[in-house]
Image (tube, rainbow, N blue to C red):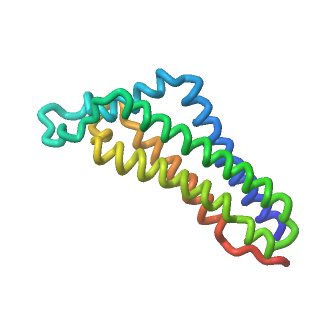
Amino acid sequence: MIAIRISKILFVFSAALFAGLVGINNILDYQINFASVQHVLMMDSVYPDNNSMWRVVESAWLHHLAYWLIIVTELVIAVLGFWGAFELWQVRHDAVAFNRQKVKPVWALTLGVLLWFTGFMVIAGEWFLMWQSKEWNAQQAAFRFTVMFLLILVFLVQKDQDD
C-alpha cells in the first residue's frame, strides 16, 4: 500500500532530520554540549567515594575525540537517512524495489540506536555512571531517541507488498 510506504519514507526523513539537527547543534553550540561529554567522562558529578573512579578519562583530547565521534555519527545518520528516504521515494510505487532500497535507512536507524543506546545509555550511563549525575544525566533523552529510532526501524523493515 502506497500510504504505508509514504509513511515509512516520512518517518525515515524525520529521523534523518532529527539526527542532522542534533549534529549541527552540537557543532554550533560546541562548548556547551561538549561540557556534557567532558563531565561524563571525568565522572566529576557521580556519587562520592565511588569504587569505579578508575574509569575516569582525564585527557582533553579524548574528550574532544569522543565528542567528534558522536557528532560524526549523528551526521552520518542524517546523510544515510536523507539519501535512503530519497531512494525510497523514487521507488515508492514498486514494493519489490522499495524493499531493496531499505539498506541505507536501515543502517541510519541502526546507527541511531547504537549511538543513543550503546553510546549514551550503556557506555555513558553505566560505564561512566552518568545515571548518578543530577546535572549531566542524559539517559532519559537517550532512551526517547533510542525508542524513536527503534520503532521507526521496526516499522520500516516490515515487508512491503503491492496491493
The quadrant of the rendering that contains the N terminus is bottom right
Q: Is residue 22 visible?
A: yes
Q: Is residue 32 left or right of residue 108?
A: left
Q: Residue at x 46, y 45 (%)?
A: 142
How many marks overall? 0
The residue shown at (87%, 68%) is 93
Residue 135 in sight in this render: no
| Residue name at image x 59 percent, y 24 percent | 28
Instruction: Please tell me whether residue 106 is drawn above or below residue 22 in the rendered image.
Output: below
Name the image quarter holding the C terminus: bottom right
Task: Identify which residue, 128 or 80, lies in the foreground.
Answer: 80
Name the spot of residue 150 as percent of width and height, x first.
55, 58
Q: Quadrant of residue 45?
A: top left
Percent coordinates x, y for residue 112 in the rendering: 54, 51
59 up-or-down from 94: above or below: above
Q: Residue 66 occupies which quadrant of the picture?
A: top left
92 vs 144, left or right, is right
Relative depth, front residue between 125 and 144: 125
Q: Is residue 1 above or below residue 41?
A: below
Q: Position of residue 4 (x, y in %)?
A: 77, 65
Q: Residue at x 84, y 64 (%)?
A: 92
